Image (spheres, grey):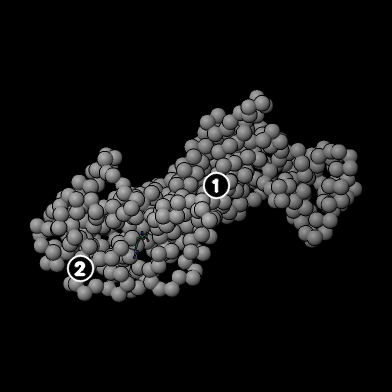
Amino acid sequence: MPRLGGMREVTSAYTVSIHYDRRLYRQDIAGSIAHARMLAKQGIIDDDDATAITNGLQEILQEIEDGSFEWRPELEDIHMNVENRLHEKIGEAAGRLHTARSRNDQIALDIRMFAKDAINEVLDAVHDLRSSIVLQSEANITAVMPGYTHVQRAQPVLFAHHMLAYFEMLGRDADRFRQAYDRADVLPLGSGALAGLPYPIDREFVARELGFSRISRNSMDAVADRDFLLDFQSAAAICMMHLSRMAEELVLWSSDEFAFTRLSDEYTTGSSIMPQKRNPDFAELARGKTGRVFGGLMALLTLMKGLPLTYNRDMQEDKEGFFDTFDTLLATLTIFADMIDKMHIVPERMREAAQGSYVLATDIADYLVDRGMPFREAHGVVARLSEYAVGRGVQFEELSLDEYRSFSDLFDEEVLAISVESSVGARDVPGGTAFSRVKQAVVEAKTQLLSEQGAESDS
Ligand code: ARG
């Protein structure tokens, strides 16, 4: 039988990872330089060799950055590409770099370093989005909108209160990313292939050189562990889930049906045949891309679940999903920060929606409770009242006092003063939507962002 694919090319291509793991070049080279310095300091290799190695590696870094480095797929991965080039440059001394090291602890080191930098970038982007949210909240602090449950208008709330819910969600995301950072911040180098090394190495020195706060305690765990990637990917999945919910609201709010917001032209596109349309493509794509981020988490969990200790080649498959998750999340956060920033709010429409429905029903029930009626009974009265109002096609505000009193004689003219504003104002409890509470929440949010900025630039 003639073969359809050239079998030889397929077999060699199967193991190659250089087309994606070359992204780790900076980490790989920095790790090797620190390792070579440690080997020389400990007298494991001599100083001249270490100098030749570090100079050679620095040149290779240059070559990669200016685009002159020739990537060779037949050398499979980033480690072998760099090491081979070092041989070409400095000859025999290059062979001493891999003393007291294995690709197993080397790759674990590279991804940990990459993950730490990636998490810092994500944290900055989360910070920026949270800032946009707070600024929009502040700029529209008096806007009232219907709050929803089941996408049914439920009770009036401040738009700022609604937005600050996302500030909270993203604050928890930031916490999760900081935890993921802490788990990544452990130096695995010095574990060798799996059992440790028969050389007098100084792991603490390497940790300091590379900015790790501590070293791994078990060499087998160190080469077999990818929990820090799972931490990152699960934090990313939850964060994308939040962004996707926000995306969904932006899609709804910018529809003609809601018309609460107008997204800036940069973040909408026209239709080729329906010129009136402003499709919220960026929000929709964010909602869609959430799927691939969830997929990345699922892929990595599945990849790891059946692996015996320690390193297995399966683990090479950890990287593409991780990079894709990082790229997708960072782009989404960055776009959302700008999209929220430039979003135009239509407070009149929000107010209209809050007014033009029966969102004050709970307030009327609370009014009766205030006058001594048990809540369950009040609920029944207001249910009958609503039925009556809906039947006549009028709003609560349009009912006369006599009409109210035909449902309960606890009603007096104060019921006519119940409004969207009085409803919002009444929710004056910690965490409630009253104007003063939300104003205070904005102040606290800004303080939190400022303190984070200080703390994160210190680290
Ligand atoms: N390319 C490999 C990976 O990404 C590097 C480690 C290879 N180690 C080994 N023993 N084959 O996982």
Label 1 secondary element: helix
The amino acid beneath tag 2 is Asp
Residue drawn at (10%, 62%) of the image: 46
Q: Is residue 269 left or right of residue 84?
A: right
Between the residue at mark 2 and the residue at mark 1, the CA separation in whole angstroms equals 44 Å
Residue 324 seen in this snapshot: yes
Residue 116 seen in this snapshot: no
Point out residue 392 in the picture as x, y percentages from the top left corner. 89, 39
Specify the quadrant that holds the C terminus: bottom left
**In front: 394, or 11?**
11
The count of marks equals: 2
Point out residue 375 in the picture as x, y percentages from the top left corner. 77, 59
Q: Classify mark 1 as within 8 Å of ligand 1 or not, answering yes or no.
A: no
Which residue, as the protein is rendered here, is positioned at the far front? 1
Q: In the rendered image, which residue does mark 1 sit on?
A: 289
Pointer 1: residues within 10 angstroms few (<14), some, or many (20+)?
A: some
Q: Is residue 11 left or right of residue 142?
A: left
Q: Is residue 430 left or right of residue 194?
A: right
Q: In the rendered image, which residue does mark 2 sit on?
A: 202
State whether residue 371 is above or below residue 335.
Answer: below
The amino acid beneath tag 1 is Lys
Pointer 2: residues within 10 angstroms few (<14), some, or many (20+)?
A: some
State whether residue 246 is above or below residue 317.
Answer: above
**Which numbered circle lies on residue 103?**
none
Label 2 secondary element: loop
Chain-order first, disc 2 or disc 1: 2
